[in-house]
Image (tube, helix red, strand yellow):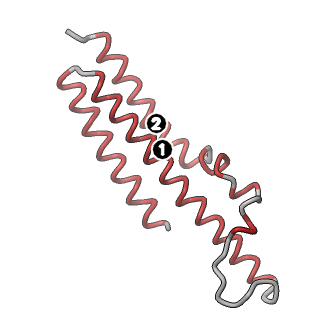
Amino acid sequence: MNGNSFLIKSWCLTIAAATYGFAVNRVDWRLTAIGMLAVHGFWLLDTSYLQQERLFRLLYDHVRLNTRAVPRFSMTTTRYQDREVARYQRVFWSLTLTLFYGMLLAVGLVVFTLTIIFQP
């Protein structure tokens, strides 16, 4: 799961930099909007991976503490989805994701504003 999260972040950074760079070069706010939409999509995708990772950690802890409560070789995480630490909204607004994707969206907002102001 960590590898997937790293790949998502690297692709997001690459796409955001490319679209923001083209937007500044062409002075086109629509390219910036596409870049910001892509950042938001990657943020949602990374949130789902981080949520799954947290659910599997809860399952691991449950098995580690009480081996008879979980059937052998079970990877079902449905019983842990109500836990606060694994809720989608909490994972979405976690510090690491908010800092990374929030910064990319903030840069996009600056580029968006500048391309509207300086549009020919």
Query: Could you tell me which secondary element the residue under label 1 belongs to?
Result: helix
CB within 8 Å, label 2 to label 1: yes
Query: Could you tell me which secondary element the residue under label 2 belongs to?
Result: helix
Q: Could you say which is closer to the camera, residue 12 or residue 77? A: 77
Q: Quadrant of residue 108?
A: top left
The C terminus: image quadrant = top left
Q: Residue at x 22, y 20 (%)?
A: 27
Residue for badge 2: 103
Q: Could you say which is closer to the camera, residue 75 or residue 3? A: 75
Q: Residue at x 68, y 71 (%)?
A: 77
Estimate the x, y position of residue 57 in percent, counting from the top left: 66, 71
Q: Could you say which is closer to the camera, residue 104 or residue 38? A: 38
Q: Quadrant of residue 82?
A: bottom right
* 47 sits left or right of 29 in the view: right
Q: Residue at x 29, y 32 (%)?
A: 20
* 96 sits left or right of 104 in the view: right
Callout 1: few (<14), some (14-19), or many (20+) C-alpha neighbours within 10 Å? Answer: few
* 51 sits left or right of 41 in the view: right
Estimate the x, y position of residue 63 in percent, counting from the top left: 74, 82
Residue for badge 1: 100
Q: Is residue 108 above or below residue 89?
A: above
Q: Amino acid at mark 1?
A: Phe
* 68 sits left or right of 34 in the view: right
Estimate the x, y position of residue 84 in percent, counting from the top left: 76, 54
Q: Amino acid at mark 2?
A: Met
Estimate the x, y position of residue 45 in percent, counting from the top left: 48, 53
Count of marks placed on residues: 2
Q: Quadrant of residue 32?
A: top left
Q: Residue at x 32, y 17 (%)?
A: 114
